[in-house]
Image (cartoon, grey):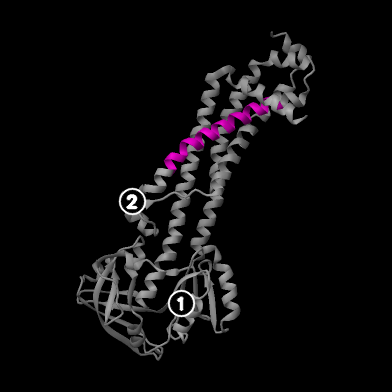
Amino acid sequence: MSFRGVIGLARVAWRNLWRNRRRTLIVLSSVVVGVFVLVLFDTLNLGMVGQMLDNQLRLHIGHVQIHRRGYHANPAVERFFRKAEALRQQVAAEPEVRAAAPRVLVHGLLSSAYNNGGVQLVGVAPEAESLVTFIADQIVAGRYLTGEGSEILIGERLARKLEVRLGDRVVAMAARPDGQIGSEVFRVVGLFRTVSADFDRTMAFIPIDRARAMLGLPSDAAHELAVLLDDARQADALKARLQATLPDTLEVLTYRDVVPLLVMQRDLYAEMMYLIYLIIGVALIFGIINAMLMAVLERLPEFGVLRAIGMSEGRLFLLVSLESLLLGLLGTAIGWALSLPVYAYLARHGLDLAVFSEALAAFGVGSVIYPRLTLRVVWNAWLIIPLVAWLGALYPAWRAIHVEPVEAMRAV
């Protein structure tokens, strides 16, 4: 059949849809609601999963990390590397790198006059760290680190546990590479609150020079160099290039290597959405089959006449299936048009779930969810729903082409 012939059949199919407006509008409304709900559900969940990963990257991890080889598998305090500042400058010179910051990391004990708790002590260069992470923007009381003196920045939840306030002193203790216990008295200069409850309970930031002194490390030592990129998709390319140029004693890891579970969760969600589309599609397909089958049964005499005057089975099959396909495309277009203004509003203002803030904090998600619209969402909506509508017409179309012309015309 020629293209003009298909267009002609499509015009006839469009007119046939509106011969029974009530039935068409009922089925059309179900498609519209399905598309509307799917688009908003998909974009909101994609935004939530994306925020979980982005928050972890900007809170502490970065897009790329450099350690002494073996440190990631066994983060012992003695696995440090030298010439941290020279390495930072070398990595920062890469074109896709936005910022890089050296860190001294150690698990230790933080004690106050009232309580104590295990923490991850992070020695940072304050200025460089503020370019890689957004901890400096999460201060809710006091100030950020200056790098001078024995100052410490802790989470608001940790401060409540230790029963300390701004200006109070705490004692940090951690094992040194020589097996001794290093300790230092710090004054709380700032409290931060992030979207992650675990982070706020377990992280404490101190100047990198004080961390080196407490642990007895050389003045140019670091356990980690955290790197922030302009685009996370450049991480693998940078890793390959750095690993080829840096000494064999160092290893380069991307965020996929550091937090594989979060990355897997994001990828798993993308696969799970196909299942959700399938569930919605199955619900829609039965309604479409019912409506199209009723339409076919009502028009049996018409089909009998068409067959009697020479319409082929293929053209009749195409006519019925085109009616359903046009219904799916129209419903998708309307549902898409209705969902876009809602998406635009939520993308700008977010969906405020403050009532669930504690639960969301346990997952590292903020109380405001911002949806994300991707090409995958567009592709799913415009492909799956019309395809489901077309599949729903296959059985009615099969019934239509198996009509005997003489028997069908007797019902006229």
Query: Residue 389: within the magenta?
Result: no
Residue 330 showing in the rendered view: yes
Residue 124 showing in the rendered view: no
Q: Residue at x 35, y 90 (%)?
A: 180
Residue 55 placed where, x, y %? 41, 61
Disc 2 is placed on an element classified as helix
Disc 1 is placed on an element classified as strand
- Write down the residue under mark 1: 225
Viewer-proximal residue, 372 or 161? Answer: 372
Tell me where residue 159 sits by quadrant.
bottom left
Residue 96 placed where, x, y %? 52, 69
- Write down the residue under mark 2: 356
Viewer-proximal residue, 317 or 335? Answer: 335
Q: Which residues are magenta?
A: 318-343
Q: Residue at x 73, y 15 (%)?
A: 304
Mark 1 to mark 2 CA distance (whole Å): 35 Å
For this view, does 410 lie left or right of residue 178? right
Tell me where residue 157 sits by quadrant.
bottom left
Viewer-proximal residue, 144 or 383? Answer: 144
Q: Earlier in the sequence, mark 1 or mark 2?
A: 1
